[in-house]
Amino acid sequence: MHRSHARCTIQALVLGTLVVVAAHAQTPQQPLAAPQQPGAYTLTTGTQLVVVDVVVEDSNGKPVHGLTRDNFVVTEDKKPQTILNLDSHTADQDSKPGPALPKMPPGIFTNYTPIAPDSTLNILLLDTLNTPMKDQSYVRYQLQQYVKKADPHQRIAIFGLSTHLYLLQGFTSDPEILKDVIEHKLTPRASNLLDDPVTGDAAQSLADMIIDPTVASSVAQFEADAGAFQANLRTQYTLDAFNDIAHYLSNFPGRKNLIWFSGSFPIDLLPDASLNDPFSVMYLNEEEFQETTNLLGRAQVAIYPIDARGLMTNPAFSAASHGGPLAGRNPGPAAMQAVQKFDTAQFSDHSTMDRMADDTGGRAFYNTNGLAQAVALALDSGANYYTLTYNPTDQRWDGGYRNIKVALAGQFAKPGLNLRLTYRRGYYANDPNSKSRGLVSATIPTSDTTAAHAAEAYRRNAISHGAPLPQDILFKVRAVPASAAPEDTIAANNSPDPAKPIKGPFRRFAIDFVALPDEFKLTPAANGNHIGSLDFSAYLYSPDGVLLNATGNTVTLNLPPQRYEAFLKSPVAYHLEISAPVKGESYLRLVVHDVDSNHFGAVEVPVAAISSLPPAPEPTHSSAAPH
């Protein structure tokens, strides 16, 4: 079944038709332990396509419409490529309503998100990890100004980043919802990994206050090491977040514009190709770095970095720095060193912003206090673009970086027109059929457009409270009380945190998953059987993300041909039960995991939303797979 067909059919699934997946063996329950790291899903062979979104603007920044395939020229590593297809996208296409999701009965939820095929999606990311609180407050104020005049047809989601990525609001075109989220959820948060999480001002070094040069040198080295450690942590957390964003967005069609508000930009998503060793200045896992880069390309994500600090001047020249290093008429070497350090840091940040935007087809905004205007410009630019595809002439999947260049031909190539093209500048040529874990191909097999997900960071995010809900596996789930009265003990096979045991009385909840069999990737074996492992889990979290309880099971499938044919004809279902304290607020994170492909689906439900529902009838199937 084609993926788009599956997304439509998921609406028709009825939980009353529950069946149990067939299995030959079943692993013990270990919901609190990290699952074994799976290998990447083997993509089917076929023609590999490179997809490139191109924004064409005139000298005034206005979109240029009406171009055809013959007006574009594409080269890869300076070798001409044949454009197979060109689609034009304009802002007025976003005014078309997407498919409506039927109203769910009480206690039934789905991770399906209805999105029109030709729509452009926009994401606002407030980076509290790398931004001082005072700048976060200014971003919040500017976004409040923006949503007052926001186009009601633009689909916008809002994310936050601390030490992990969290979803504040899914895609919506309702300005009132956006206003409410910005007003009540977009609250400033202090970052523990910034020198000054409030103002961002660099504190005076302890080494500068020590007279003994030997001691001062040791202290300076200690401060440098501590600063590097914090910077590396911020870099890794930021890369993980972009990895999660790319995974999440890869399941939606079309272009996505990521508006990233940050007070510092610790990562450059592509290595510096001008160096002999492009990775010599990076402290990240190279495979993870390549995977994130390729995932962003495959998901058609263009990054628009916006410097949350606004218009910046060297604090040494500020009137507020009276008595500072430049207060005297003849500033010494220390003062000039402070000036140079600020200028160098600012240049580095802005260079990184420019490269990230150029490499993904976006645009950077810095040294401006008009953040609301920057958002409007970014969303307008990202809504008018062309999508072209080509089959690369170089079919060697050696993991090397391939440079893409797009130019205009004919009358549109005249220098006097000053037309500007923005697009992603390349990809890593990883083998699309490789079984190597952690390397995702940037090309798209025409016979299977589903992305493969294998990063461990993605697994952590998929099960985390408040994180984006992955949609690799579309499913419905019923979550209702399993009993009418509270209970003194937790449900069987639950695993509460032994360090912080939850206290009764408890309410036991019945969790019934159901999905189409096409959502799972069973691998054919040499003996003709189809094998795979499906994991069903339920996690109970406190409002601040502390894991309180969990349950789950992994079903191992080894289906002979006849049983496999039967498997394909019925929905896949599973039943779990989990207990939650009657007192206090908590949330259920319900997760389906196709272990072999590392695909996930997740739904998150406030316990308060289901605790007053009528109890579920006794399940007609067991949580244990039949023999």
Image (cartoon, grey):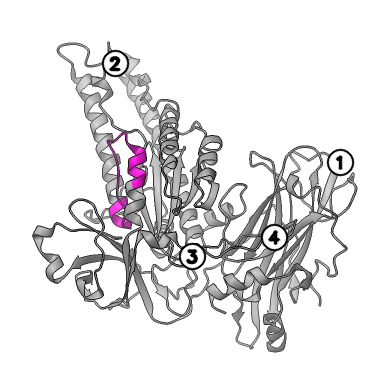
**Marks 2 and 3: CB-CB under 8 Å?**
no
Q: Which residue is mark 2?
A: 321
Mark 3: few/some/many CA within 10 Å (<14, 14-19, 20+): some
Corner quadrant of residue 121: bottom left
Disc 4 to disc 3, C-alpha distance: 20 Å
Mark 2: few/some/many CA within 10 Å (<14, 14-19, 20+): few
Q: Is 66 situated left or right of 510 in this image?
A: left
557 or 349, which is in the foreground? 349
Which numbered mark, 1 or 4, is in the foreground of this view? 4
Disc 1 to disc 3, C-alpha distance: 45 Å
Q: Would you say residue 359 sits in the magenta stretch?
A: yes
Give the residues in magenta: 356-376
Is residue 147 visible in the rendered structure shown here? yes
Is residue 291 visible in the rendered structure shown here? no
Q: Which residue is mark 1?
A: 505
302 or 268, which is in the foreground? 302
